[in-house]
Amino acid sequence: MPDYHIDGHKIVASAPPGGLYIVATPIGNLSDITLRALETLAGVDIIACEDTRVSGKLLKRYAIQTPLIAYNEHNAVKIGPSLIEKLQSGDAVALISDAGTPLVSDPGHRLVVDALDAGIRVMPIPGASAVVTALSASGMPVDNFQFSGFLPSKTSARKKRLAALARVPATLIFYESPNRLGACLQDIAECLGPQRRVTICREMTKLHEEFVSDTAEVLASRYRDKKVKGEIVLLVEPHTDRDEFDTGKLLADLLGELSVSRAASEAAAITGLPKRELYQQALELAQDRNSKNTGNNGK
């Protein structure tokens, strides 16, 4: 009989019916796992995970012997069909991510869709989620929120994405790399407004857990050259009519990559201000920049 151990106590697990089990795992602290998740992981025939080394630590903690198979963005096309075959033969398969609830910023969605298309039962085993955990302790409005995963790594693409979200009347939630935190906060200040409040949630449930809240402008300055480590979730308060933008700086940045007309269009989408006014401002900035360049070339 399959089993698992808690604090040295052996607990026998029953084998669940065949099907695909979407099992949430801890986002940091390995104690944050449900009894039902342990029962399921111990009882299924195989566990599909992002990284066997990461998930192996969780299984070792609870002495779970179920075989692991890597299923991630690099091998999903190859491994997915074999998992569907196992499910069609009646096996019970658990899908887990490195941390938190599967399918949230991981490739599990494809497997779930394929399983449903094949008439296979898909069952959620709920538990930890970095999105909800961050929201619960952030002080941000919780009645309406939008999770947008990871923002693009390139500045121009990130600003374009933020522009599309600038006027959303909901708490915005992002995952972010610690290496891009400073640049991301700067773009949030420029594209969403310097006075928008932002909460940085870092290393949640771990030893160095940290929640830092302030305006986008203040945090952008604080983290501009600050090196940080760990998993990060960013929350931005909903758009309100009081949000103000540094249109001069925004247009200057956009003019570094776009024509006057396109820069004005992008700025209008971000700020909600009239394109005609922004076009005139962009034109003046471009003319001023050209005159300075001409003057420098003449020296």
Image (spheres, grey):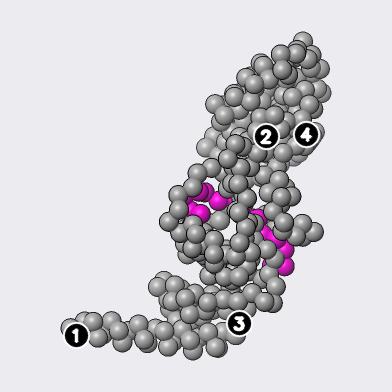
Taking 13 as reference, is 114 above or below it? below
Q: Nearer the viewer, mark 4 or mark 2?
A: 2
Q: For the residue labelled by badge 2, is the local secondary structure a helix, a strand or a loop?
A: loop
- Image x and y of residue 94, in percent: 71, 28
| The one of 45 and 290 positioned closer to us in this rendering | 290
Taking 39 as reference, is 172 above or below it? below
Residue at image point 52% right, 79% down: 247
Residue at image point 46% right, 73% down: 254
Which of the two discs, 3 and 1, labels the residue nearer the N terminus? 3
Location of mark 1 (residue) = 298
Cα separation between marks 4 and 2: 12 Å
Q: Amino acid at mark 2?
A: Pro
Q: Amino acid at mark 1?
A: Gly
Q: Amino acid at mark 4?
A: Ile
| Contact between labelled residues 1 and 3, with CB atoms less than 8 Å apart | no
Q: Nearer the viewer, mark 1 or mark 4?
A: 1
Quadrant, the C terminus: bottom left
Location of mark 4 (residue) = 125
Q: Which residues are magenta?
A: 168-181
- Image x and y of residue 161, in percent: 57, 63
- Image x and y of residue 172, in percent: 67, 59
Cα separation between marks 2 and 1: 63 Å
Cα separation between marks 1 and 4: 70 Å
Q: Amino acid at mark 3?
A: Leu
Location of mark 2 (residue) = 26
Q: Residue furthest left?
A: 299
Location of mark 3 (residue) = 273
Decide: few, some or many residues near mark 4? Use Cα within 10 Å; few <14, some 14-19, many ≥20. some
Which of the two discs, 4 and 3, labels the residue nearer the N terminus? 4
